[in-house]
Amino acid sequence: MNKILTGALLSITSIFFASTSFAGGHDSCGEITIAEMDWASAELIANIDKIILEQGYGCTVELIPGATMTTFASMDTKGVPDVAPELWANAVQTPLAKAESEGRLFMLNGAPIVGAGEGWMISTKIMEDNGLKTLEDVLERPDLFPHPEDPSKGGIVTCPSGWGCQIATNQLFKANDMEAKGWMLIDSGSSAGLNGSIEKAITRNEPWFGYYWGPTVLAAQGGLSLLNMGEFAGNDNWDNCLMDPECADPKPSGWVVSEVTSVVASNFIDNGPKAGKDYVAKRKFPADVMMSMLVYMAENQAEGEDAAYEFLSRHPEIWTTWVTPQGAALIKRAL
């Protein structure tokens, strides 16, 4: 009887340890927090990360709402969340470099979306019809982009509060002396407000001028193109003045080349699963695939979780190259 009980206990113990391992023998992952930023591509990636890290690597993942500046500040000072899947690093270049040098944060993936870009965008048709080739050309024609509250002024749509691009746009507005040239800022108020301003322009067939980025559905639907804003005036001007609302003497500049990165806190480096870290470092979304997923989200009013499962079902040829074979098998089983 003792031999039978001992054998049974050994079997139960082996089953327990087998069930608490994952993806073929990695250590337990534990709890991970991931920033779910308030725009569609970031929402999608956060949910894909959640599914893959939970199903493939045994993590317990909590998604935390975020935005560029607030998420970075929290990661830098508190180490939470552990992962920011799509951080537009230009907005926080100087403090991010400091946090990296001091071992608090790490840029684990320098290009999670291939071909991403940002800056001031303009309706392509208006640009072509009026021979507008540069920012200087646009600033001479405020009449083409009437401000909704004062049609005698031109209007440029800026970013929601908490986004780094709001600071840069406000400072570039000063640097280019736009108020004196007949322009006013249009505060978008929120991510939904920014998108709504483009949707309204599409519906009414009106021109649009403001900050946006790609690849995005709205940039394509709205016929928007990145505007030639002139030469980039250097990192010192960008990092220490255009990104500092207290800087009184910003210089005009082209938009900094976008650096979109996946940033992780030291906790993820120290305690996350090695294979999970390899996954975050490897995962790259081709621009056309990301665009197709954003179209899917828009047309189906799909939330991030539903879109993540759709991506994993549609594109195993992509995501299976990011994970271990054992992890891929477990994830496929969960779909």
Image: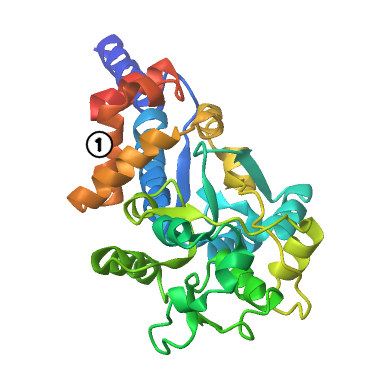
Foreground: 173 or 281?
A: 173
User: On the image, numbered disc 1 is attached to which residue?
Assistant: 310
Question: Would residue 83 be visible to someone looking at this image?
Answer: no
Could you say where residue 303 lies in the image, as x and y percent from the top left? 26, 52
Residue ID at (37%, 53%): 223
Foreground: 327 or 171?
A: 171
Residue ID at (47%, 59%): 127
Give the amino acid type for the residue marked by disc 1 in the picture.
Glu
Figure quadrant of the N terminus: top left
Q: Left or right: where does residue 234 sit relative to residue 67?
A: right
Residue 23, quarter of picture: top left
Q: Left or right: where does residue 318 sit relative to residue 134?
A: left
- Secondary structure category for the residue under label 1: helix
Question: Would residue 192 be visible to someone looking at this image?
Answer: yes
Could you say where residue 48 lies in the image, as x and y percent from the top left? 37, 39
Residue ID at (41%, 86%): 151
Residue ID at (49%, 80%): 154
Foreground: 36 or 326?
A: 36
The answer to whether residue 198 is above or below residue 47 is below
Could you say where residue 59 lies in the image, as x and y percent from the top left? 42, 38
Figure quadrant of the C terminus: top left
The answer to whether residue 19 is above or below residue 68 is above
The answer to whether residue 317 is above or below residue 20 is above
- Dot 1 surroundings within 10 Å: few (below 14), some, or many (20 or more)? some
